[in-house]
Amino acid sequence: MSAIQQIPEHYVTEFSTNWMHLVQQKQSRLKEYVTLDTVNGKEKTYNQINEIAMREITSRAGQTTEQDLPLAKRWIREKGYDSVNIFDEFDERLWGTIVLPSSQTVQAHAAAYKRTCDQVIIDALGGSAISGADGTTLTALPASQKVAIGGTGLTLGKIIAAKSLFGKNDVDEEEELIMVYTQAQLDDLLNNVNEVKSSDFNNVRALVDGTITKFMGFTWVRSQRLPKASTTRRIFAYAKSGVVLSDAGHKVMMDIRPDRNHALQVRSVARLGSVRLEEKKVVEISCLES
């Protein structure tokens, strides 16, 4: 006797009642490696004094020669950011046993906020800093603070060149130096056979488990948000005190919207700003990346 043929037509498909987050950066990777501050108002200024030279006294009871005080000013201005999702008033009922993903949406908004913190910092590293007495001057990172692409990815030579600039600029040796890179630059180092064979380079943790935390005096932090144009990726090395992040905090609100047929709105808001305080504390490295 043969099996009943119609039975498979009535097999049941089970549906998950919960929600899973797809792969994404969920934590800020750069926030702990910059100087944190707050802005109480629309903007904040940072008053700066440049180095002063001493002169040799060549005569007794001579005429006093005064010097001008070399002053500068940087500005930080926050911008508002938000994430908004709306669920129809009948969604919870129409989804049946599937849980309304309101709490998971809040988690997704939190991850978006943390990624935005990193993006604001990266934009400040390579962008134009607001400066001048009235905050209308835009100061770009000069060519003297850039390591050219040279037709290669990240090499030991480029790392040495970046580290050398901090020394030539007399950046305090106690300063924590950060190197922000993408996975492609780590791949460059791991695939460079000649450099990997050197005894010093073999001490890098990258050769043990494919990651890198400390090397050449830098704390290494990976971010896939670094700017790329065509086949050129720009990565940054900087001193922690050279970049400020202003963060007014992250706030989440869940409201019933009468103007949207009593739909449930989940909205997250943040105010963030960042500025590069000194060009001599930031180095841009251009890397070939296909």
Image (tube, rainbow, N blue to C red):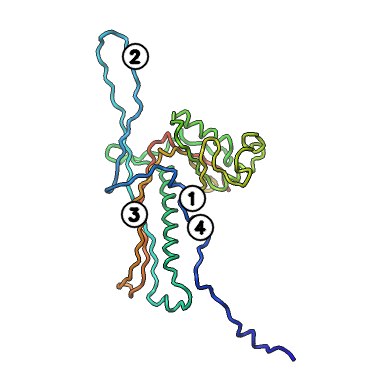
- Residue most extreme to the right: 1
Tell which circle, 3 or 4, labels the residue nearer the N-terminal end.
Answer: 4
In screen coordinates, is 260 left or right of 237?
left
Mark 4 residue type: Gln
Say if residue 234 shows up in the picture.
no
Give me the C-alpha separation between circle 1 and circle 2: 51 Å
Dot 3 lies on which element?
A: strand
The image position of residue 188, as x and y in percent, is 60, 43
- Say above or below: 184 vs 167: below
Q: Quadrant of the N terminus?
A: bottom right
Give me the C-alpha separation between circle 1 and circle 4: 12 Å
Tell which circle, 2 or 4, labels the residue nearer the N-terminal end.
Answer: 4
The residue carrying mark 2 is 56
Crowd band around label 2 with a 10 angstrom C-alpha radius: few (<14), some (14–19), many (20+): few
* Residue for point 43% across, 47% down: 31
- Say above or below: 144 vs 66: below
Q: Nearer the viewer, residue 267 or 130?
A: 267
